[in-house]
Image (cartoon, rainbow, N blue to C red):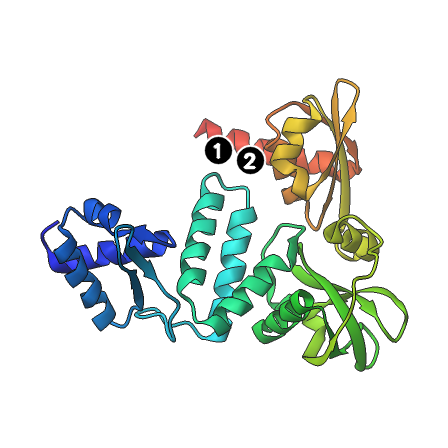
Amino acid sequence: MTDPGARTLRLLSLLQARRYWPGADLADRLGVSARTLRRDVDRLRGLGYPVAASRGVDGGYALAPGAALPPLVLDDDEAVALAVGLQAAAAGPVAGMAETSVRALAKLVQVMPARLRRQVEALRTMTVPGGWGPTSEGDAVDPAVLTAVALACRDTERTVFGYTPPGRERAERSVEPHRLVALGRRWYLVGWDLDRGDWRVFRLDRLDGPRGTGAVFGPRRFPAEDAAAYVRERIGSAWSRYVVEAVVAAPAGPVRARIGRWATVTDDEGGCRVRIEAEDLDWAALALGVTGAPFRVLGPPEVKDHLRGLAARCAAAAAD
């Protein structure tokens, strides 16, 4: 690679893709000498990229965290939005997206300033994905609230915030935050309510002004193995308009691998039984369709009418 500009961009991409590069390996990937590699590294440093170097036989290069991320500079809200988007893509059903999303997130976290890196890492590690679907405008969560609660979960710090339940006045709540759960179109906080002496589930779009108290709390025994399952059980019909049940003519393992995160899949004679909680029947039909096997709907009755309409539309599209 003879063009210095193109080579510099390639060098930056390689440094972002791996935590540390031996000098010889990096020069070989670029097709240049060690001397040219040093000049290219100096060029990157001149552009504001902090490249650390170690000398000796096993010497090499690493892209160190900096005060900014040139030329891409992210503010706090953008860093949170990026982490949420990449996390959702990594957990999604689109083939090939998970590995790519995780790799992109790793590149960004590696070179982010410590303050932004701490926020992104807190959100990533303290969130339990539990559902599917875009967030509607009415359920939008302030990124600052999301970040503050994620940090409190990670740091096991007692937190105070305002909370407005439906049909009731806003009140201050003191909580030991446990986990964030992204379920359906909403975000939830699971935590120990100090005022009520019990575990509670809070919708983040109803939560405001979270602030740490500086008091660190010890672990409590959580009443469930999975935080997402706990939230589903507690909110019940508040999240789902429909509870669809069907028998699928396929082993539970493969079916669970396709839709297990979005449904409950249990063994059944000759196949498996699938239970789907959804806000609309389109999602239930899609989930059953991607099993790749024949299925029989047990209920509710409107699911069959919905499938007939969907089948007619698909047949008409296939006939064109």
Give the residue at the far right of this rendering. Answer: 197
Amino acid at pointer 2? Arg
Q: Secondary structure at mark 2?
A: helix
- Residue at screen point 79% across, 82% down: 172
Q: Say which of 198 and 320 sits in front.
A: 198
* Mark carried by residue 313: 2
- Location of the C terminus by quadrant is top left
Query: Within 10 Å of the Cα at label 1, are there few (<14), some (14-19), or many (20+) other Cα atoms?
Result: few
Q: Are marks 1 and 2 in contact (CB under 8 Å)?
A: yes
Residue 157 in the figure: left or right of residue 45: right
> Residue 289 sits in which quadrant?
top right
Tell me if I can see residue 284 in this picture. no
The residue at which mark 1 appears reads as 317
Q: Say which of 244 and 78 sits in front.
A: 78
The CA span between labels 1 and 2 is 6 Å
- Residue at screen point 40% across, 57% down: 107
- Residue at screen point 19% across, 66% down: 42
Residue 233 in the figure: left or right of residue 134: right
> Residue 52 sits in which quadrant?
bottom left
Residue 167 in the image: above or below residue 180: below
- Residue at screen point 69% across, 69% down: 204
Residue 308 in the image: above or below residue 130: above
Amino acid at pointer 1? Ala
Q: Position of residue 64 (x, y in %)?
A: 37, 65
Give the residue at the far top of this rendering. Answer: 270
Residue 209 in the figure: left or right of residue 173: left
Q: Position of residue 290 (x, y in %)?
A: 59, 33
Tell me if I can see residue 225 in this picture. yes
Q: Say which of 69 and 247 sits in front.
A: 69
Q: Position of residue 71 (x, y in %)?
A: 30, 70
Q: Position of residue 114 (x, y in %)?
A: 47, 71
Q: Secondary structure at mark 1?
A: helix
